[in-house]
Image (spheres, rainbow, N blue to C red):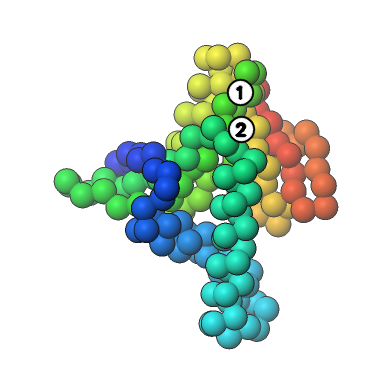
Amino acid sequence: MAPAIEFRNLAVPMRPDDEDFLFRLYASTRQEEVAAWGWNQAQQEAFLRMQYTAQRRWYDMACAGAEHRLILEKKGEDAQPIGRILVLRAKGAIELIDIALLLEHRNRGIGTALVRELIEEARQSNAAVRLQVLRHNEGAIRLYRRLGFDVVSEDDMRYQMECSG
């Protein structure tokens, strides 16, 4: 059973603690990949910070108007950030730009529940849910296929997938 989840919209400009969390989250999604390159810790962090900054700037530019929320795990009166979701809604489509959870919160049903909510929203509005996933992200690809997504196109790095609501 998935834990109690709530959301908080990210403010613009972003709070310093949110910025720190989002970097830590981003780094957690790339840590295994970057560690395999044999770089020392300082090199890894410098690279990850550069990549995080580039991603954030791209999202700010290319995804203006997207809903960007922190995923919070509620524990009693406290709620701690455990992930983020970035969704862009347009006529006929809901684009899942990014969804990420800290490693210790993956494979607990949280991401599945969030994607299912988007699929249900799409069904009710006669839209499709679209996303891109890195070709080497086998776990995410399995999840999306299980939830009804099909590959509609691909490039050297990513599959573009879609689920009709």
Q: Which residue is mark 1?
A: 90
Q: Is residue 142 among the parts visible in the rendering? A: no
Mark number, residue 95: 2
- Counting from the top left corner in percent of width and height, residue 78 is at 21, 49
Looking at marks 2 and 1 on the same chain, the residue that comes earlier in the sequence is marked by: 1
Q: Amino acid at mark 2?
A: Glu
Which residue is more in the foreground, 28 or 13? 13
Q: Residue furthest left?
A: 77
Q: Is residue 61 above or below residue 139?
A: above
Which residue is depicted at the point 43% across and 44% down?
12
- Counting from the top left corner in percent of width and height, residue 164 is at 65, 22
- Work out how far the residue at label 2 is from the one at label 1, CA to CA, in angstroms: 8 Å
SS class of the residue under badge 1? strand
Which residue is depicted at the point 60% across and 38% down?
63
Q: Residue furthest front?
A: 13
Q: Residues within 10 Å of mark 2 (few under 14, many from 20)?
A: some
- The quarter of the image holding the C terminus is top right
158 left or right of 80? right
- Counting from the top left corner in percent of width and height, residue 84 is at 46, 47
Which residue is depicted at the point 65% across and 54% down?
137
